[in-house]
Amino acid sequence: MKSGLSVSWIVLACCLAAPPAFSDPTQLIIGVVYVGAINDYGYNASFHQALTQVATNLPGVKLVEVENVPESGEAERVMEGLVQQGAKLIFPTSFGYQDSARKVAKRHKDVAFAFAGDGDTAKNFGVFFGSTQAAMYPMGVAAGKMTKTNKLGFVIGMPIGYALGNVNAFQLGARSVNPKARTVVVVTGGWSDKAKEAEAANALLDQGCDVVAMHVDSPKTVIQTVEARGGMSIGFQSVEARVLAPKGWITGLGFTWAPYFTELAKSVITGRFRGEAVYQGLGKMVAIAPFGASVPPDVQDLVNTVAAKVEKGFNPFTGPLTDNTGNLVLPPGAKVGADQMGRMNWYVDGVIGKAR
């Protein structure tokens, strides 16, 4: 392994049957590649926690995790190494791992890959992700009710479609309860740059934003920066992030991958794995975090009511919608579904920032 990479091993006994493709029918080795650290209170932590739960759900799983792997040729080398260690299910957890993962998958048809992102599927290559975009709508409702300045902030790492979708739903939710609400976006240019994340959070606070949300790998820096200056935050990636803001925490979204990952592992064990695209939202892969102590009961009730509406199928990306330059981007009745979010390249009216 490259110097500086951290490897965690979780080994448990197993008595589950496996198909002939497994060299050892008494265990399933799952390999995981992370772009950051598993204790980041965010994206990487959400995967680690879920896969640890898989090991609990399916006694006998051997979990091999490699942290801090850059989105470069190094990722391909690490995944090849996991295959050589006997991994039969590999999770490339970062969008930037896609090309490397596909190369390794083509070389090893007997290994299942579950890529956190989008794109084409293959017999041994599936794609999945939590549909956070619609789920971000009730987060906007919470922000729109809690703000006193009507200026909301949103820090994103890169202006990819999924991040833009999160911002758009957030603004749409805020505007639904507070027509004066506006969302200011700052892009850091990377998913894990603590210095730029702190700078972005401070810039938003300096502009008068009193509620700040984010889409970066770890929400820790943004939340703690906002907390230190007396602002309020909406968390993302892991519900555990709430411990970072004892005063300013409103609520947040967290991934709940464990049930889906457990079924994936079972499908590999029994030889039923088939690559498919799976996108699930609230009630499946995404959950709302507990509310902060400062959030009034009526606001909590409203957010929960709206969240239930989203869970039942409400799609905030339903036309007519105009972008923040005045162009009609969704005509009446047109919709953008979860499988189309990766291609979103516009901000809705009320968002202050450039989509591209």
Image (cartoon, rainbow, N blue to C red):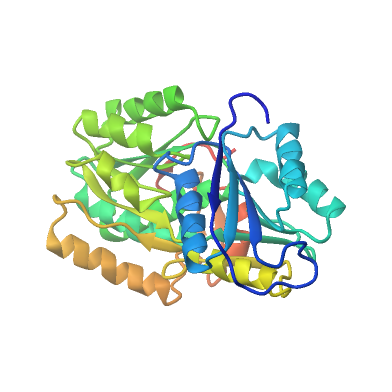
Residue in the picture at 40% in, 55% down: 254
Where's residue 311, x and y in %? 41, 72
In the image, is 27 to the left or to the right of 108? left
Residue closest to the eye, 292 or 135? 292
Q: Residue at x 39, y 42 (%)?
A: 41
Give the image location of residue 133, x and y in percent: 48, 57
* Relative depth, front residue between 154 and 327: 154
Q: How many marks?
A: 0
Along the line of sight, the residue nearer the viewer: 66 or 176: 66
Q: Residue at x 55, y 31 (%)?
A: 190
Q: Residue 107, image x and y in percent?
A: 86, 51
Q: Is residue 331 visible?
A: no
> Could you say where residue 354 lies in the image, as x and y percent from the top left?
52, 37
Left or right, 117 with reference to 104: left
Q: Is residue 111 left or right of residue 339?
A: right
- Residue 278 in the figure: left or right of residue 171: right
Residue at the image position 39 percent from the left and 53 percent from the top: 170
